[in-house]
Image (cartoon, rainbow, N blue to C red):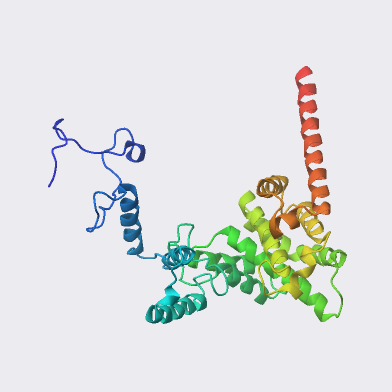
Amino acid sequence: TPQNTTDPSVDIVTNHEVVGADGLGRVYVPSPPDDYDSDDDEEEAQATALELMKSQSIGYDMTLIYQKWKKLQREDEDDGFSLDEMDSDSDDSDIMEDNWANDPSSGGGAGPATDLDTDGMQIAGRQKGVDVVRELRDICLEHETASPVENLRIELNSFKFSQNASYADCCKGATMAVMEKILDENAEGGETITPGRLVASLKKMLDYWGPLFESLCIGSGEEKAIIHSLESMALAASGGGGGCSSTFGVLGTEPAFRFVLQTLHDREIVNEEAIFEWAKERREEGQDGPMGVLFWQKPTQDFLEWLEEDSDSSGDEESSDGSEEDSD
């Protein structure tokens, strides 16, 4: 029923922090379930209602419900109660677990799906179950370097728009492809890939691929995506991601990661700002885990220290030049 908004006696709830000081309206919040008991926790009941509404929305990832179900099951087992004690329910739960494990979008198979956002909702415009980074990598691997790199950029852009991907996704896929090409070429020649040989091949490869990265990197976010993809390959090689230990093992070997990072910086593909932001994130996370071990390798730390000193000295020179101009 329409309300008379001009009548001051009518109390209308308005979320001004959302619609503005002069706006009129509120954020819709679903009502608690029908079986809600007034003695129950009202916030918990409201959260349940909100989760139910999300689960009935288009694009909701049912993986989240499964994960919560597994968590509750573990809690029940800790309390001395297990679903295994119920024969019929046990068989059903085993079948359900197998189905989720084989579903590529569940995170139990080939890895986390890239068609979901941080809230577990389907990304608008993206095909369900599509790993956009792997698809972008495959496009780069299939590209013939005899043709202009601009042709590849157009192809990547087309796929990016078709799947509502990002330039960061393109950078990750291109980085993976370049590293695979380097390692495959050395393997075909029967040569053992070493950190020095890896960097020499990378420099040669960037003569062609460098302009592509320059066109894809529109900010520090894309440049950090390149570093993150290198980390992922190195960790997969050491067992942190599985599946490609023989291919990317050299990346986790000192001082390969430092050499690759420095080469990308020297070629102005990854600048100081992106490196410093990445380093800050890793320092806050600490030294525990494979990611910390990789980051805290001495050669990498030496490079970061040199880069920070070089940045400080450049800043001091600019300041002194500005002071001299003012005095003139």
Q: Is residue 200 positioned above or below 181 on the image? A: above
Could you say which is closer to the camera, residue 168 or residue 321? Answer: 168
Indicate left or right for 166 with 207 as reference: left
Question: Which residue is situated farthest in the top direction here?
Answer: 327
Q: Is residue 312 positioned above or below 279 on the image? A: above
Q: Position of residue 260 (x, y in %)?
A: 78, 59
Indicate left or right for 322 with 155 as reference: right
Q: Is residue 277 positioned above or below 317 on the image? A: below
Question: Which residue is situated farthest in the front direction here?
Answer: 80
Name the residue located 42 percent from the left edge and 82 percent from the top edge.
Answer: 91
Q: Position of residue 140 (x, y in %)?
A: 65, 71
Q: Position of residue 289 (x, y in %)?
A: 69, 58
Instruction: For residue 219, say whether it is visible.
Output: no
Name the residue located 77 percent from the left edge and 71 percent from the top edge.
Answer: 182
Indicate left or right for 105 with 53 as reference: right
Could you say which is closer to the camera, residue 218 or residue 86? Answer: 86
